[in-house]
Structure formats: structure tokens, C-alpha cells
Image (spheres, rainbow, N blue to C red):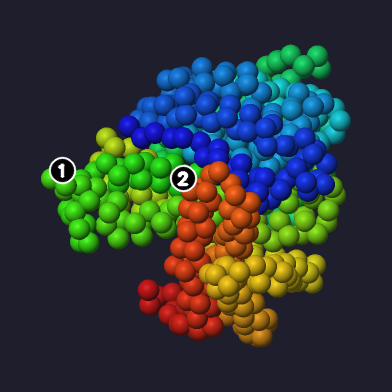
């Protein structure tokens, strides 16, 4: 059975040595000293490894079941959910006014990685609730906030987001779910939604569905979509639960992975709903939830990669196969461990350098969200908006690939369910699809985000990388050659791709859109390259200061060198593809495929 250990030391290094959170000046960050964050992460690590991870295989094997209209979660989930609630983890970064602990989002993200790595399917129940609560917090009336948020923050009530319908996924303007206005100001919601994560279960007293629907007579397409709060049980004026609403589970989807999460078909039959935000502005309200969810999904890609890597590493150290070509390393045994072989090392280094770079990228993104919200920094808000599709798309693509590579370390045993590695691959696969499939993320990045605010934010990113290289180019000859020069080259590739889109995308949009996926990955590599340059600088500073933990910092620098030398040059390949334009991609007529 696989194991999991929370990467507390690495997270602490990123928070305090790289991001220097307690010195950043963001409101609330002055309380995040190393002792405090370590205490939080230690407790989160303990519940992850001791409570959540043992249920990961249970959830995968048992799944959820629907009996007489009631959804039952796997054995042990309900008791574990109670422990998570009792520990206050569900409201870690939510306002104290509604029962939360008001910690910065960066702490919620760090803890979220651990919980997701330990048990992604389980953690989704509270994750979806957090997103729904955030949407109500941002767009609800005071009465709605007072009614729903205290019990959603505590997860006595959980939440969902209902977008997709059988005939429409990404193109939400095609939705048919209707919201008929009532005399009392409520609406009657009728329609069907599919793929609803955490749609129904036995772990909460009520489930608060956020449902996209169209009010008759509104504008056509996406401009006519509104968002509604539709509780499973009607909430009375005194806060107690009343009658069952007209919402039911049609079935539980049979999925490739995340079996422990109840992904449901939800039927709305004249269910009572309450407008959240403004009529016909539902997508604006829903995107409060979706943008948060996209960062969280990117984190899931990292989390599954980290958990898979930990187990692949242990297997590579223990499994005896063949002899080291440079000389026997295990003379007392019949063979040497797998880890002596160069191709196994390459595989493990791919995983390690990705996971540690991605962790820094995710936490940097979370810090930007805090800077945007807590310090009302519009530039930070613009930059994280630009990077959100990169975080979601690149990290989930790469995270999935890393779980496959971890599985490969096991050889045939990786393909056998008994060893548990296939679950990481199956669970990671969904992250590339939900909350906006990765192809859509790439289109959003190139089609919308690059030009946002006149291109201000992407230019700010390039300037940030340029300034970093300029300010740190003379730290040492080795650092400049191994980190600064590769980062400069990769950034120039990214700028060249952007220039190609500007020069060729206006005359033929396919020239830009055909290269969007490559651009998203190129952008991701540059971001991880920047993170590795930052981490290597911080690690060298600790070594220069005579740290007693030299091995950790030397390992960090060596891992960074690997990423810069072996992964970052992929930007040149992506640029070459982009510059071929759209003609070869669009050459075949539909009937020629």
C-alpha cells in the first residue's frame, strides 16, 4: 500500500526563504513566522498521513453508492470528515465573522496540497464548499451570507458548483436550465446538470448548490446566464432546515478515478432558488469560484505528482534489478537497487524537479491572490489572472505525466492495482479536464489574457524576469551560467512567441490559436525556471551563511540545475512549433480525418 509524508520542510523553505512571507508587508502576513507556519503544517501533515491517506485506497475501491435517493460515501469518510471539521481546517482562510480562522490564502493552499496528495477525492468535498462559500462571500447579500456562510465555513453544510449539462460543457451559452421568477422574489429552477462533484453525500446536513440557469426573456447565449443558490433543504428564517427542495440525484457517474468523490447527475424539478448577484451576470459570479478552483486544480496536479514520486522513490531504493554499469553497488545482494541506473535517475529527477518547482509556483500564485485581496493590489490581481490558466493547464498536464513516470519506475507492478500506483494516474487525469479543459485554458491565455489591460500584465511579467536576471547575474559565475542564462533564453523564446502571435494572429487567428497549447507550456516552463532560479539563490544564501543543513540546500541547487539543463530548453521546441503557424494544423478538411 502506498504511503505519504507531507513535504513540510520544502514548504517552509519556499514560504520563508524564497517568498519571505512574514516580511512581505501583506496584511496578516506579519503573523506568519516560521514557528507558526511550521505548527500549522505539522498538524496538517499529521492528519494527512494518519487520517486521510489510509482512506485513499478505500475510497478508490469502494466508491460511492446511491440507494433509495441517498448517496453514501466510502467507509471511514464520514468519521474523517468530522475530524477535519473539528480541527477547523475547512475554514482555515475564511473570515472570522463566519467562523473561519482568517489565515491568508497562502496557508490554505499549502495545507490543501497536503490534503489533496493524501486523498484527492475526499478533499474535494471541502474544496468545492470553499469555492461556493467564496462566491457567496463575494456576491451575496448580507442576508445570504448570514444564512449560508457560517455553516458552509464549518462544513456542517457543503457546497457545489453546477455548470455542465448533457449537451453543453464549455459552451455554457447553450444551457437549457431555466429559472422562473416567483412573486416572493425566489425562482423555480428546472433542468439537469451533470458531472457535479460532491453533488450529494451523507457527510453534511445540507448541500448548497450554486446553479447556473437562464431567466426567460433574458439575453441570448452566455449573456443571459444567472447564478442561483439552490439548497438541498430549504432554510427557514430561523436558520433551521425545512422541507426537501426539488433537487435529486439521477445517478452517480462511473469514473476513471476519484471514485471516493460523489460525482452526480443532478435533477432540478421546480426547485426553489435564490438569485446570487445580478440577473444575467451569473458567469461573473461563478468565475469567483472557478478562478479559485483553477488554482486548486493546478495544485491537485502537483499533489498527485508528489505522492506518486514519494512512492516511486522508495521503490527505486528497495527494488533490486541489474548491476550498475560503473561497478557493483550492492555486493552482498544478487543485484543493485533500481536507483543506481541512469534512466531511473532521469525519471526521478524529472519528477522531483517538477514537484518542487510547481510547489513554489503554486505558493507564489497564492501569495499574489493574498496581495490582490488583502492589499487591494491591482497589479498582483492582473498578474495572477494572467497566470491562472498556466497554473491550471501546465501543472495538471505535467502532474499527470509525472504520475505516469512514477508508475513506470515500478515496471509491471505499476500496472497492478495491488501496488496502488495506478490510482495516482487515474485520479490525476481528471485535473486536466474539469474546471475548464486544458485546451480551453490555453485559448483563454492566448485569446484573452495576453491582451488584457493592453498587454500590461504580460509585459510586467517579462520585465520582472528581466530585472531578476539583471539583479542576480553577477552573484557568481556558476549561478549565472547554470540559472540566469537558461532563464534569459527561455524568456526570450516566450517573448518571441508572443511577438509571432501579434504579427500573424491578427491576419489569421488560427496562427495564434494553433500555437496556444505550446505557448501555455512554454509559459509554464519559464515560470518554473524563475522559481528554480529563486530557490537556488535562496539555497546558496543559506550555504554562504554556514547553515547546519547544508545537504538540503546542496540538493536543492542540484535539483534546480537539472531543471534548467534538462527541462527548461523545451521552450525552444515549443517556439519552433508555434512559428510554423496554423496552416499545417488546419490543412485537412473535416472529412479527410
Instruction: Name the foreground residue: 268 vs 229.
Output: 229
Image location of residue 133, percent across then percent down: 72, 34
Q: How many marks?
A: 2
**Above or below, 17 relative to 567:** above
Q: Which residue is mark 2?
A: 306
User: Which is nearer the eye, 251 or 518?
Assistant: 518
Residue 32, image x and y in percent?
73, 37
Quadrant location of the N terminus in the rendered image: top left
Name the image quarter holding the C terminus: bottom left
**Can residue 1 be spotted in the picture?**
yes
Element assignment for label 2: helix
Disc marking residue 333:
1
Q: Residue furthest front?
A: 546
Dot 2 or dot 1, earlier in sequence: 2
Say whether marks 2 and 1 touch (CB < 8 Å): no
User: Where is residue 35 drawn, in percent x and y?
Assistant: 67, 32
Quarter location, residue 275: top right
Q: Would residue 404 appear left or right of 560 to someone viewing this image?
A: left
- Residue 472, x across and y down, in percent: 67, 68
The residue drawn where x is 74% and y is 27% is: 100
- Label 1: state its secondary structure: loop
Amino acid at each position: 500500500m502506498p504511503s505519504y509524508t507531507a513535504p513540510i520542510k520544502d514548504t517552509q523553505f519556499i514560504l520563508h526563504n524564497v517568498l519571505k512571507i512574514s516580511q512581505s508587508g501583506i496584511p496578516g502576513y506579519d503573523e506568519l513566522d516560521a514557528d507558526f507556519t511550521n505548527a500549522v503544517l505539522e498538524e496538517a501533515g499529521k492528519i494527512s498521513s494518519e487520517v486521510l491517506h489510509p482512506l485513499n485506497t478505500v475510497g478508490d475501491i469502494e466508491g460511492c453508492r446511491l440507494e433509495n435517493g441517498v448517496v453514501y460515501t466510502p467507509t471511514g469518510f464520514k468519521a474523517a470528515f468530522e475530524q477535519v471539521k473539528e480541527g477547523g481546517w475547512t475554514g482555515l482562510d475564511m473570515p472570522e465573522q463566519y467562523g473561519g480562522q482568517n489565515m491568508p490564502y497562502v496557508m490554505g493552499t499549502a495545507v490543501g496540497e497536503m490534503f489533496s496528495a493524501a486523498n484527492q477525492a475526499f478533499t474535494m468535498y471541502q474544496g468545492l464548499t470553499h469555492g461556493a462559500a467564496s462566491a457567496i462571500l463575494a456576491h451575496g447579500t448580507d442576508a445570504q451570507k448570514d444564512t449560508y456562510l457560517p455553516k458552509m465555513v464549518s462544513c456542517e453544510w457543503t457546497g457545489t458548483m453546477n455548470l455542465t449539462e448533457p449537451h453543453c460543457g464549455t459552451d455554457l451559452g447553450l444551457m437549457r436550465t431555466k429559472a422562473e421568477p416567483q412573486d416572493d422574489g425566489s425562482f423555480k429552477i428546472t433542468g439537469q446538470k451533470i458531472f457535479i462533484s460532491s453533488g450529494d453525500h451523507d457527510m453534511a446536513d445540507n448541500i448548497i448548490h450554486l446553479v447556473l440557469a437562464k431567466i426567460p426573456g433574458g439575453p441570448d447565449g452566455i449573456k443571459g446566464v444567472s447564478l442561483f443558490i439552490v439548497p438541498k433543504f430549504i432554510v427557514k428564517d430561523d436558520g433551521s432546515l425545512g422541507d426537501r427542495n426539488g433537487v435529486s440525484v439521477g445517478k452517480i457517474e462511473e469514473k476513471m478515478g476519484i471514485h471516493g468523490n460523489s460525482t452526480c447527475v443532478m435533477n432540478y424539478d421546480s426547485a426553489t432558488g435564490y438569485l446570487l448577484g445580478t440577473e444575467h451576470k451569473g458567469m461573473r459570479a461563478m468565475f469567483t469560484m472557478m478562478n479559485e478552483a483553477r488554482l486548486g486544480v493546478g495544485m491537485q496536479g502537483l499533489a498527485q505528482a508528489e505522492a506518486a514520486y514519494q512512492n516511486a522513490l522508495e521503490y527505486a531504493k528497495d527494488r533490486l534489478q541489474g548491476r550498475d554499469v560503473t561497478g557493483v553497488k550492492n555486493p552482498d545482494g544478487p543485484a543493485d537497487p533500481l536507483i543506481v541506473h541512469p534512466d531511473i535517475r532521469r525519471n526521478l529527477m524529472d519528477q522531483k524537479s517538477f514537484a518542487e518547482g510547481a510547489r513554489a509556483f503554486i505558493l507564489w500564485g497564492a501569495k499574489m491572490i493574498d496581495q490582490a485581496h488583502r492589499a487591494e493590489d491591482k497589479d498582483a490581481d492582473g498578474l495572477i489572472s494572467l497566470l491562472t490558466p498556466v497554473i491550471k493547464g501546465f501543472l495538471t498536464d505535467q502532474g499527470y505525466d509525472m504520475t505516469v513516470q512514477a508508475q513506470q519506475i515500478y515496471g509491471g507492478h505499476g500496472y497492478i492495482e495491488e501496488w496502488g500506483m495506478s490510482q495516482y494516474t487515474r485520479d490525476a487525469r481528471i485535473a486536466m479536464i474539469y474546471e475548464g479543459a486544458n485546451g480551453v485554458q490555453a485559448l483563454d491565455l492566448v485569446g484573452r489574457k495576453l491582451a488584457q489591460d493592453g498587454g500590461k500584465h504580460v509585459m510586467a511579467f517579462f520585465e520582472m524576469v528581466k530585472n531578476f536576471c539583471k539583479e542576480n547575474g553577477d552573484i557568481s559565475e556558476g549561478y549565472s551560467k547554470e540559472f540566469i542564462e537558461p532563464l534569459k533564453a527561455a524568456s526570450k523564446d516566450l517573448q518571441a512567441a508572443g511577438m509571432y502571435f501579434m504579427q500573424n494572429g491578427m491576419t489569421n487567428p488560427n496562427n495564434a490559436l494553433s500555437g496556444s497549447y505550446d505557448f501555455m507550456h512554454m509559459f509554464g516552463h519559464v515560470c518554473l525556471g524563475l522559481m528554480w532560479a529563486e530557490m537556488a539563490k535562496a539555497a546558496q544564501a543559506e550555504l554562504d551563511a554556514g547553515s547546519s543543513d547544508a545537504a538540503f540546500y546542496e540538493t536543492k541547487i542540484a535539483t534546480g540545475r537539472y531543471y534548467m539543463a534538462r527541462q527548461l530548453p523545451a521552450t525552444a521546441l515549443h517556439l519552433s512549433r508555434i512559428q510554423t503557424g496554423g496552416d499545417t494544423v488546419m490543412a485537412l478538411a473535416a472529412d479527410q480525418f
